[in-house]
Image (cartoon, rainbow, N blue to C red):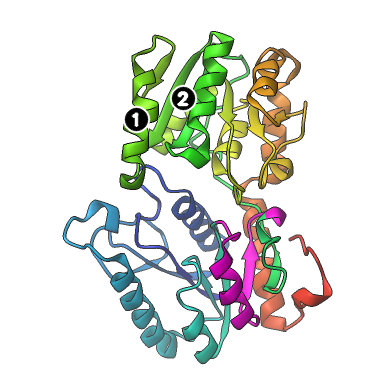
Amino acid sequence: MYIAQVAPLHESIPPQLYGGTERVVSYLTEELVKRGHDVTLYASGDSRTSAKLIPLIDKSFRLNPVFGNILALNVLQLELLLQDADVYNYDIIHFHTDYLHFPLSRRVPGNQVTTLHGRLDLPELTMIFNEYKEIPVVSISDNQRLPLPMANWQGTVYNGIDATPYTFQPHRGRYLAFLGRISQEKGVEEAIEIALRCGMELRIAAKIDSIDKAYCKERIEPFFKHPLISYIGEINELEKSTFLGNAAALLFPIRWPEPFGLVMIESLVCGTPVIAFNKGSVPEILENFVNGFIVNSVDEAVAAVGRLGLISRHRCRETFDKRFSVSKMVDGYLEVYHNLLSNTYIPSDEVVYQHV
């Protein structure tokens, strides 16, 4: 198939540091190429890919101080794609750019699909999807799609990652890990409280967005002086293997409806169990007492730390291999592509969940 992957411009593909969506787009693109498909990737020029790369800008938005308005860049990227679509005649155009392209999709012939990577429980999105009910979309968890039953869901395809950079660690470590982004919704305050109450070291490897700097300075940074709390900063994919593999558990005490939570499967591939709050996608990713603990409070999380000896790290890795590999994810997307091409997909008003 001739496939176009349209990636966000905020980070490179793959991202140099933080960037879950961009990492997934990279894994998907590379595996499709390996399977013999002709893939064109629309992304920033500092991306690394075996597909044909069509860049709009030399460097990703976050690393390029020249640009101050990413919306303008996104509009230009869509114009570039529109011009190319008449030339390359793609079988599938796969968007990973939220809903910005929906007016374009309605007016451009051809098979298109959009993976929605973010949260969907915002009131303005109901207005968007009531208008664009015909646009084919894919969810990354069943829970993610609940606020938008009117959307034209083609299936739920769970994110997958390449296991190659990660090393399975069969022995339980001595510290707790927090990986991702320092923000209120990610639950870093709860992670600190859990660690302190357990008397265990907590290592925090996280990005701090500009919007969260004031929150971090006021609520989080004072804890960095505590001997049990270590702030490492952002880490890359290779560093994650050691960081997660040597931990006793990953703490994931989220305060929001997490659409997927890539860090959970990054932990499982290393054999490290996850202690997570029961929100969003968590019950779809974790199996209680098998590859971690699903809890409802800090008290329950503290108790779960004391039960980590009940979890088999081999079972954690088995969960990853069975459900969250790149191959499994790409199989799901290829099924979506083929269904669109053959016009055999099931309209969303006839099915609640169509797993692929």
**In the picture shown, does residue 287 fall above or below 14?**
above
Dot 1 or dot 2: first in sequence order is: 1
Question: Could you give the CA–CA distance between mark 1 and mark 2, rounded to whole angstroms?
Answer: 26 Å
Residue shown at 46% from the left, 67% from the top: 97
Residue shown at 57% from the left, 19% from the top: 194
**In the picture shown, does residue 282 fall above or below 155?**
above
**Location of residue 137 in the rendering, given as x and y in whole percent from the top left corner:** 62, 71
Identity, as a three-letter code, of the amino acid under mark 2: Phe
Residue shown at 26% from the left, 66% from the top: 69
Tell whether 57 sits left or right of 300.
left
> In the image, which residues are magenta?
119-143
Q: In the rendered image, which quarter contains the C terminus?
A: bottom right
Disc sitting over residue 56 in the figure: none
Q: Secondary structure at mark 1?
A: helix
Q: Secondary structure at mark 2?
A: helix
Does the magenta-highlighted stretch encompass residue 222? Answer: no
**In the picture shown, does residue 49 fall above or below 293?**
below
Q: Nearer the viewer, residue 200 or 331?
A: 200
Q: Where is mark 1, residue-wise?
A: 218
Disc sitting over residue 243 in the figure: 2
Specify the quadrant of the image occupied by residue 334: bottom right
Q: Nearer the viewer, residue 106 or 32?
A: 106
**Location of residue 61 in the rendering, given as x and y in whole percent from the top left corner:** 28, 58
Residue shown at 40% from the left, 85% from the top: 82
Identity, as a three-letter code, of the amino acid under mark 1: Glu
Tell which residue pokes out farthest to the right in this image. 350
Does the magenta-highlighted stretch encompass residue 142? Answer: yes
Structural crowding at the residue carrying mark 2, measured as other residues with C-alpha within 10 Å and reported as few (<14), some (14–19) or many (≥20)? many
Is residue 17 in view?
A: yes
**Location of residue 324 in the rendering, given as x and y in whole percent from the top left corner:** 65, 45
**Location of residue 19 in the rendering, given as x and y in whole percent from the top left corner:** 42, 48
Is residue 234 in view?
A: no
